Image (cartoon, rainbow, N blue to C red):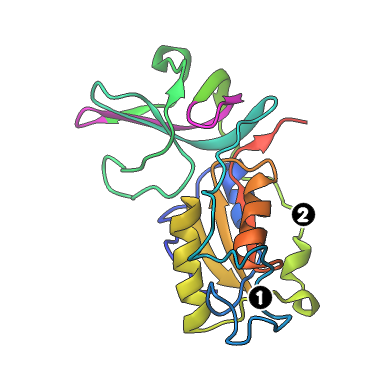
C-alpha cells in the first residue's frame, strides 16, 4: 500500500469503514500500454484517457438521506465544515470539507474550542446536493467504527490492472486530483480513491477514463438504508 495523501487521522464510522475497504486499480499510466490495441489498456471510446477525457467527473447529489461519522469544525465566523478526509492533529485541529448547513453547536455536546475554533466528532444524517451537506440529525459518534464487509477487489486472485510501483503511484496522483479525492492509495493493483459521495456515476467515469478494474471509487457519505 502506498498512500498518496493518507489522512493524519481516519475519521468517522462512514469514512473509517470506507478506508478499510479496497479500491480499484488502473494501468501503469493513464494512457495505458504502448500498444493501444492491448487488452491491458484502458477501455476507451474515442481514445478517452486521463489526458484526453472529454468530460469532467460528475458531482452527483444523493437521492435520499446519507450519513457519516466525521469531525465538524468551525473556524471563527466561517461556516461549519464536515471533515470527511484527514484531520491534522494540531491544537486546535485543522481540516476542511463541504459546508454543513443547519448546524447548531448548542444542539450537540462534547464539542471543544480553542483559538476561535470549535470542533467535535459526531454521527450526522442529512441530504447531499452535490456541494453542501444539509443536516437533519446529529448525535454522538460511536466509540468504535462498525466492521466493514471485505471488498472483493482486495482478494489476491482479483488484482487490478494498475499494478504497482512508480507507474501506479503516478496514476494515483492523477486520479486523486481529477476526482477531488479525500484520500487515496494503491493496493492489490487498484488505485483507490475516496470521494465525498458517489452514486455510481463517478465510478463509471473512472472506468471510462482510466480503464475498467483500474480505479476503485469509495464514498465517504453512505446512503441511509
Q: Is residue 123 magenta?
A: yes
Q: Is residue 88 magenta?
A: no
Q: Is residue 104 above or below residue 76?
A: above
- What residue is rendered at 66% in x and 38% in y? 222
Q: Which quadrant would the N terminus be assigned to in this image?
A: bottom right
Residue ID for mark 1: 188
> Would residue 149 appear left or right of 139 to someone viewing this image?
right
Residue extending furthest front? 46
> Would residue 118 appear left or right of 34 to someone viewing this image?
left
Q: Position of residue 154 (x, y in %)?
A: 72, 69
Residue ID for mark 2: 149
Q: Which quadrant would the C terminus be assigned to in this image?
A: top right
Q: Main secondary structure of the magenta part?
A: strand
Q: Position of residue 99 (x, y in %)?
A: 42, 28
- What residue is rendered at 50% in x and 81% in y? 167
Q: Which residues are magenta?
A: 114-132
- What residue is rendered at 53% in x and 66% in y? 185
- What residue is rendered at 53% in x and 77% in y? 29
Amino acid at each position: 500500500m502506498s498512500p498518496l495523501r493518507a489522512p493524519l487521522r481516519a475519521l468517522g464510522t462512514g469514512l473509517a469503514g470506507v478506508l478499510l475497504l479496497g479500491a480499484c486499480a488502473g494501468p501503469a499510466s493513464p494512457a495505458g500500454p504502448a500498444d493501444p490495441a492491448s487488452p491491458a489498456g484502458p477501455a476507451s471510446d474515442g481514445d478517452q484517457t486521463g489526458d484526453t477525457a472529454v468530460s469532467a467527473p460528475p458531482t452527483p447529489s444523493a437521492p435520499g438521506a446519507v450519513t457519516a461519522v466525521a469531525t465538524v469544525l468551525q473556524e471563527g465566523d466561517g461556516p461549519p465544515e464536515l471533515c470527511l478526509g484527514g484531520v491534522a492533529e494540531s491544537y486546535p485541529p485543522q481540516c476542511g470539507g463541504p459546508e454543513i448547513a443547519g448546524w447548531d453547536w448548542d444542539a450537540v455536546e462534547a464539542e471543544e474550542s480553542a483559538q476561535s475554533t470549535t470542533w467535535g466528532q459526531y454521527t450526522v444524517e442529512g441530504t447531499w446536493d452535490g456541494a453542501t451537506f444539509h443536516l437533519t440529525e446529529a448525535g454522538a459518534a460511536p466509540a468504535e467504527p462498525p466492521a466493514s464487509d471485505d471488498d472483493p477487489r482486495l482478494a489476491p486472485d482479483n488484482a487490478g490492472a494498475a499494478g504497482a510501483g512508480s507507474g501506479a503511484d503516478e496514476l494515483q496522483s492523477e486520479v486523486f486530483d481529477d476526482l477531488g479525492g479525500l484520500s487515496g492509495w494503491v493496493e492489490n493493483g487498484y488505485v483507490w480513491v475516496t470521494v465525498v459521495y458517489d452514486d455510481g456515476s463517478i465510478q463509471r467515469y473512472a472506468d471510462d477514463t482510466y480503464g475498467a478494474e483500474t480505479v476503485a471509487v469509495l464514498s465517504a457519505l453512505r446512503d441511509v438504508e
